[in-house]
Image: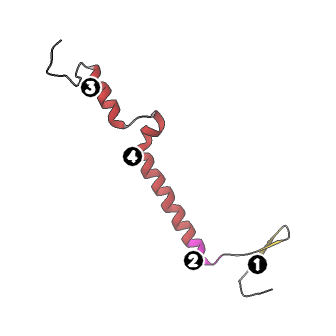
Amino acid sequence: MASGHGKTVEYAGLKLHEPEKWHKYLGEGLASLMWFWIFVRAYHDGSTLLFGHAPHFEHELEHEAHGHGEHDGEHH
């Protein structure tokens, strides 16, 4: 077997090589970027995800409930 892979760790008979430091830092950086993106999207799209409609939809419902529909100038 080749022995130039750095430190080896054994788990239940399975020998694994420890990752290089840059692998660890790259993985942590990408994981941080992923969570940042998830929180940004939740901030912008959270009401759609939770309530099933876009945020502007609530404003349209309030507007129509107060008697302001698409036909504001028309009288029936």
Q: Is residue 3 above or below residue 66?
A: below
Gap in Å between the C-alphas at discs 1 and 2? 17 Å
Q: Residue furthest top?
A: 76
Q: Amino acid at mark 1?
A: Thr
Q: Nearer the viewer, mark 1 or mark 4?
A: 4
Q: In the rendered image, which residue does mark 3 sit on?
A: 63
Q: Is residue 7 left or right of residue 12?
A: left
Disc number placed over residue 44 in the picture, else none: 4
Q: Amino acid at mark 4?
A: His
Q: In the rendered image, which residue does mark 1 sit on?
A: 8
| 26 falls in the magenta region | no
Which segment is the magenta one? 19-25
Q: Please report whichever mark, 3 or 1, sits nearer to the chain's N-terminal start.
A: 1
Q: In the rendered image, which residue does mark 2 sit on?
A: 22
Name which residue lies at 45% across and 34% down: 52
Q: Amino acid at mark 3?
A: His
Residue 49 position within the rendered picture, expressed as x and y whole percent measured from the top left: 47, 39
Gap in Å between the C-alphas at discs 3 and 1? 66 Å
Name which residue lies at 27% across and 23% down: 64
Gap in Å between the C-alphas at discs 2 and 3? 55 Å
Q: Please report whichever mark, 2 or 3, sits nearer to the chain's N-terminal start.
A: 2
Q: Please report whichever mark, 1 or 4, sits nearer to the chain's N-terminal start.
A: 1
Q: Is residue 32 left or right of residue 18?
A: left
Residue 9 position within the rendered picture, expressed as x and y whole percent measured from the top left: 77, 74
Gap in Å between the C-alphas at discs 4 and 3? 22 Å
Q: Is residue 65 above or below residue 36?
A: above
> Magenta stretch: dominant SS?
helix
Gap in Å between the C-alphas at discs 4 and 2? 33 Å
Q: Secondary structure at mark 1?
A: strand
Q: Amino acid at mark 2?
A: Trp
